[in-house]
Amino acid sequence: MLLHLLYPLVKYHTIFNVFQYITFRTIYATITALVICFIAGPYFIKKLRVMQVGEVIREDVPPNHHHKAGTPTMGGTLILLSVVGSVLLWGNLANIYVWVMVFVTMGMGGIGFIDDYRKVILKDPNGLRPLWKFAAQSLVAIAGASFLYFGGFDTGITIPFFKDVYIDLGWLYVLFASLVIIGASNAVNLTDGLDGLAIGPMTIAAGTYLLLAYIAGHVKIAQYLQVLYVPGAGELAVFAGAMVGASLGFLWFNTYPAQVFMGDTGALALGGALGTLAVITKNEILLLLVGGVFVVETLSVIFQVLSFRLRGKRVFAMAPIHHHFELKGWPEPKIIVRFWIISLILSLIAISTLKLR
Ligand code: 57M
């Protein structure tokens, strides 16, 4: 909004020129989202406590989780407010990709909100039925992907490390992009089971996609690095910046011992946003590396379920894998920080693929 309001004033003073720069707006989108979280956070947490929006802990969790009962949840509403608020302020609202991002983020967040609302307020332990949840997620993802497809979006995919490989999926790209978005949304949700475990890697992944968006949207840098140039995708650096700011701001309160959980509202929204960033910046496959922690958490559940069904035996003491380490006796903060470190290493490797081709 500031771009549209203040940039025209450049005819009166050159200082207003700064509003046209993505780098400038990205920095302030990050700071704004962070500040919104800092200011609104304590008020939100207090309000959630008063409204008794507290976590209901299941019986079968590792024992160190029982004391977490009643921790305010649905903190994802704070994340949504700071991301979208900051993007509306600093983003280029004439850029269609920004609106696709807002749509998917709010859509997934809305589904998570209904799920949380049913669990926490209506006291229905099952929440939204899995099939309904998946159908709603599919609807949001397919709508976003179709919008891109019918707008003439590039339907080819590239493979990290192989600069000459380009596979054009045609209309199947809608299906592929939707799977990326739904997969990311659910993977982040599965990871969100320890204080700060999901939001730490989310901060790192969003920061990585901030860089990738800037590169994809910059004709010269994209050409130099031989990556697909996506006109307009640079604007998503502002969105990713807002995600970094909101994630850091939320981590302030969610770090061990957590004062608030993000709930499905936050996990589904942030995961969906990350998947959409990967799609629009044309770094879909790279998400497997950037979001490696989320991928490993998801694979641990798949292996556990398959192994139990096929062999009657478990691979892990409990899945997702963070529960395995808890049951092995690792203190919670140790698991969390180690997963952050792994996430950082994976993101660095992902960035190195820009050169390793
Ligand atoms: C949500 N939710 C957390 C919080 C958070 C198929 C199966 C693997 C599904 C999976 C599942 O239900 N996953 C989705 C996981 C829950 O956190 C809430 O949920 C939101 C995210 N959606 O924001 O509101 C609990 O996690 C803890 N937590 C923290 N700090 C945080 O910052 O400590 C969350 C955020 C919270 C809190 O205790 O209550 C969750 O874990 O439930 N199911 C599972 O993960 C279950 N695994 C399982 O059954 N494994 C089986 C099979 C099916 C693979 C096996 O290994 O044999 C575990 N979940 C629970 N109990 N609750 C097992 C034990």
Image: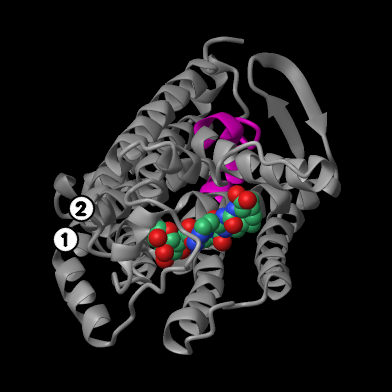
Q: Nearer the viewer, mark 2 or mark 1?
A: 2
Q: Identify residue for label 2.
A: 252
Is residue 12 or residue 73 the one in the foreground? 73
Residues drawn in magenta: 274-291
**Who's the residue at 47% across and 86% down the image?**
123
Name the image quarter holding the N terminus. Answer: bottom left
| Quadrant in which residue 26 is drawn | top left
Tell me which numbered mark, 2 or 1, is placed earlier along the sequence.
Answer: 1
Residue at 33%, 54% in the rendered image? 64
Q: Secondary structure at mark 2?
A: helix
Main SS category, magenta section: helix
The residue wearing badge 1 is 38
The x, y position of residue 250, in whole percent, is 27, 56
Marks 2 and 1, how far apart at CA = 8 Å
Q: Position of residue 83 (x, y in %)?
A: 35, 60
Which residue occupies 34% across, 64% down?
66
Q: Decide: few, some or many residues near mark 1? Use Cα within 10 Å; few <14, some 14-19, many ≥20.
A: some
Q: Which mark is residue 346?
A: none
